[in-house]
Image: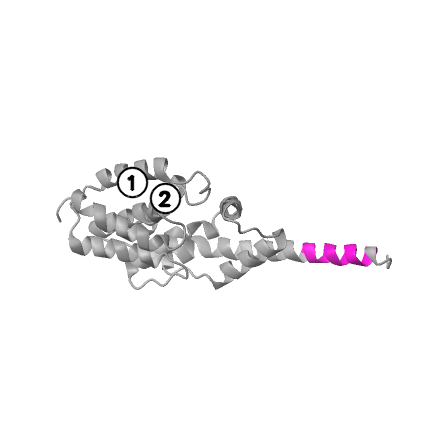
Amino acid sequence: MRKLNYEGAEKHVFTMLEHGLDKNLYYHDLNHTKDVIKSVEKLGKLEEVSEEELLLLKTAALYHDTGFLIRYKENEEAGAGIARGSLKRYKYKKRQIKDIAGMIMATKMPQNPKTKLQEIVCDADLDNLGREDFYIRGDLLRLELEERGIKMSDKDWYTNQIKFLEEHDYFTESAKELRQKGKEQHIKEIKELLGIEKNLLVIINTSENGKL
């Protein structure tokens, strides 16, 4: 295998993201990219991918949100384009660049991975759904969306969270083992929260109507 200059690509992308991303990208920031890189490395090793495949996974994670430098919507296409335009200088072959672009595109919602490596990147991108920092990450995403005019009440936000969590599936056995139970716990907690809110609304409405 020709030695890939991943370190050079990482330095280049980290610099672009640190200085080029909008400051109101509270969720899709440099920290998120670093987090996904760590997650693909963990999942890649658990799924026993080759040394080359692990580097391709890390590179896809590195570039997967670079499209936000250009636009918010359809950012995956932009990110794949940035990867295609820059990876050759870091000794990546055409086949490898094509695979990396495919992994980036697979993260587009709804996720629809076609290969094992695409599955790993998709699972890494949403690793937080089953982690302890789920609510913290969710608050950052909510704030980011509000900056773009998408504002929701607490009830609507958490209703949408349940829908997203229930419709989402991890693809790799490793991600299922690591995060499925945590994700199911979050679904349970949010449903309990909404149930409490619903009961409070009933009590308030009943009180206002003079029936208490």
Mark 1 sits on what residue?
13
Q: Is residue 89 left or right of residue 196?
A: left
Residue 157 position in % (x across, y down)? 57, 54
Q: Nearer the viewer, residue 164 or 53?
A: 164
Q: Which range of residues does the magenta coloring cover?
A: 196-207
**Left or right: 164 as drawn, with respect to 112:** right
Q: How is the image coloured?
A: one colour
Image quadrant where residue 69 sits:
top left
Q: Nearer the viewer, residue 194 or 210?
A: 210
Is residue 44 something that shows in the picture?
Answer: no
| Amino acid type, mark 1 | Val
Q: Are marks 2 and 1 in contact (CB under 8 Å)?
A: yes
Q: Position of residue 210 (x, y in %)?
A: 87, 57
Q: Is residue 167 left or right of residue 53?
A: right
Which residue is the site of mark 2?
A: 33
Q: Please tell me which residue is depicted at 62% across the width and 51% down the height of the picture.
A: 154
The numbered dot on residue 178 is none
